[in-house]
Amino acid sequence: MSIEHHPPETMLAAFAAGTLDHGQHIAIATHLVSCPQCRRFMHAMEEVGGAVVTNLPPATMSNRALAEVEARLDEPVRPAAAEAASTPPEIEIPGLPKFVRRYRFGSWRWVAPSVHVRPMVLPHVSDTRIFLLRSGPGTRMLQHTHTGIEMTCVLSGAFRQDGAHFGPGDFDLGDETVDHQPVVEAGEDCICLVAMQGELELKGLLGRIVQPFVRL
């Protein structure tokens, strides 16, 4: 598998620093599973961050710090809340990383002809929505831009946009500066993991007509 499209280095550095929100973290982690090039860069950023922390001057602690910690040793341990279901069933999606399969997902929902989405239920509050996007062979998406950041990780199948090919493992980044129209290649469904903030803004007469009915 040849991966041609990657997250920008600033996002990989933010991932290493732990500053991305939960939804975006999942999207970057999904790409890292299949991309050794980005894993090497991310690990290098972790080493830089570790070196910075090591060289920081030690923080001054209060005189009562140790006593306060010792006092908490006698506090009762609160049992973990029982989960509604101990282990959610794994879903079989080609190319979906094992760690993502452990999250809870909703049902597939129709969005447009040959286009369906399946939302992921995040355990933590996030400004980012995560969902699987499945598009049939030959599907031509409506031309659109975004009001926020959209991260797309191709799991299986492929699409083209602006003359570039996006196959399994590739990462696409969209925002308000990007105006694009992906076209799914023939042969098989294209399934992507998408992390989205904001909304789609559809272009053209048809886009304005269907805009009120498209919700991702």
Image (cartoon, grey):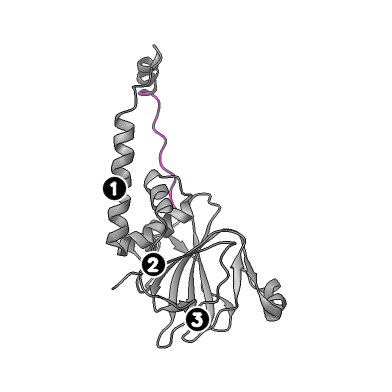
Give the farthest residue toward the top. 63
Question: Is residue 74 magenta-colored?
Answer: yes
Please report whichever mark, 1 or 2, sits nearer to the chain's N-terminal start: 2
x, y percentage for residue 139? Answer: 52, 84
* Region of the chain picked out in magenta, as a range: 73-83
Query: Which sits in the foreground, 179 or 146?
Result: 179
- The spot of residue 150 in percent (x, y) is 52, 62
The label number, if any, that marks residue 44 in the structure image: 1
- Does label 3 or label 1 sit earlier along the sequence? 1
Please say if 191 is above or below 52.
below
Q: Spatial distance from mark 3 to mark 2, Cα to Cα? A: 16 Å
Tag in front: 3 or 2: 2
Front residue (pair 23, 100): 23
Q: Where does label 2 land, which residue? A: 5
Quadrant position of the C terminus in the picture: bottom right
What number is the disc on residue 183? 3
Q: Distance between the residues labelled 3 and 1?
A: 35 Å
Q: In the rendered structure, does residue 205 fall within the stretch colored magenta?
A: no
**Label 2: how many Cα within 10 Å (few below 14, some 14–19, many 20+):** some
Main SS category, magenta section: loop
Seen at 30% across and 56% down, the residue is: 39
